[in-house]
Image (spheres, rainbow, N blue to C red):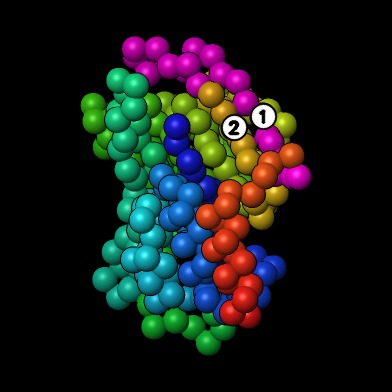
Amino acid sequence: MLLLDAGNTLVSDQPITADTQGQVTVEGMNRMGYDAMTLGDQDFRWGVAALRQRTAEAKFPFLSANVFAGSSQQLLAQSYIIKEMAGHRIAIIGVTGKNAVSFLPEGGTPEPILVSDPIETVRRTITDLTGKATVFILLSNLGFQQDQQLAAQVPGIALIVGGNPGTLMPEPYQEPTHGTLLIQAGYQGEWVGKLTLQIDEKGKVTSHAGDTVPLGTDFADDPEMRAWLDSLKATQ
């Protein structure tokens, strides 16, 4: 199983999220054992320095292949990770929308950022990873329309896990040009998306089944997570 997030995760309507600049979110994701998260445009609300701190605190990688920061304009996050699962080498690539620049705090930042073209970035990254991975998953914060465009223009992507604005999709959409699957699972933790893929020995998806599960009263709270959340409320 892979547990993935498509970004805009370090902000919420809970005051403690703003008070800690997303630190409690990262701690919660650490406790849940996330495999990776891509940087969303709103994750830049607290500035680059805070984002670097959240990256250091995370026990999972923040991904973005197209955001460059600082005077040296080096990548702010990892471009991708490769995980070995069920006999496959799975590359998980992150990509961020160009609106990220507009979400930086007012008054500028000591570390300017540059967001390069996402489609060309993903195309180049997949080319560079040819022979190193057999299955490609994209964590995208571009939005569904741009995800469709990217899937149509860049072959070889098995799955795009999308965010922004966090559309609730009852089942995956299959882009007809290359057969890439696109999914989103709502926002603010109200649902979790579940997708099961059958992949052949060549890395091609042969079948899939997925849905979105509402996290309502049918699911009992995890005792350790509930105790941690209650301890946070006690400090407010």
Q: Is residue 154 magenta?
A: no
Q: Residue at x 32, y 60 (%)?
A: 75
Q: Position of residue 227 (x, y in %)?
A: 57, 61
Q: Residue at x 43, y 47 (%)?
A: 33
Between 4 and 125, which is closer to the camera in this rendering? 4
Label 2: how many Cα within 10 Å (few below 14, some 14–19, many 20+): some
Q: Is residue 155 left or right of residue 186?
A: left
- Give the residues in magenta: 197-217
Q: Quick check: 169 above or below 228?
A: above
Q: Position of residue 70 (x, y in %)?
A: 33, 73
Residue under numbered circle 1: 211
Q: Quick check: 50 above or below 216?
A: below
Residue 83: image quadrant is top left
Residue that extends furthest to the bottom in the rendered view of this protein? 107
Residue 49: image quadrant is bottom left
Type of amino acid under label 1: Asp
Residue under numbered circle 2: 194
Q: Residue at x 26, y 71 (%)?
A: 72
Q: CA distance from mark 2 to mark 1?
A: 6 Å
Q: Is residue 211 magenta?
A: yes
Q: Which mark is residue 87?
A: none
Type of amino acid under label 2: Lys
Label 1: how many Cα within 10 Å (few below 14, some 14–19, many 20+): some
Q: Are dots 2 and 1 in contact, CB under 8 Å?
A: yes
Between 17 and 231, which is closer to the camera in this rendering? 231
Query: If the image is split into quadrants, where does the N terminus sit?
Result: top left
Name the main secondary structure of what is drawn in magenta.
strand
**Secondary structure beneath label 2:** strand
Q: Earlier in the sequence, mark 2 or mark 1?
A: 2
Between 200 and 76, which is closer to the camera in this rendering? 200
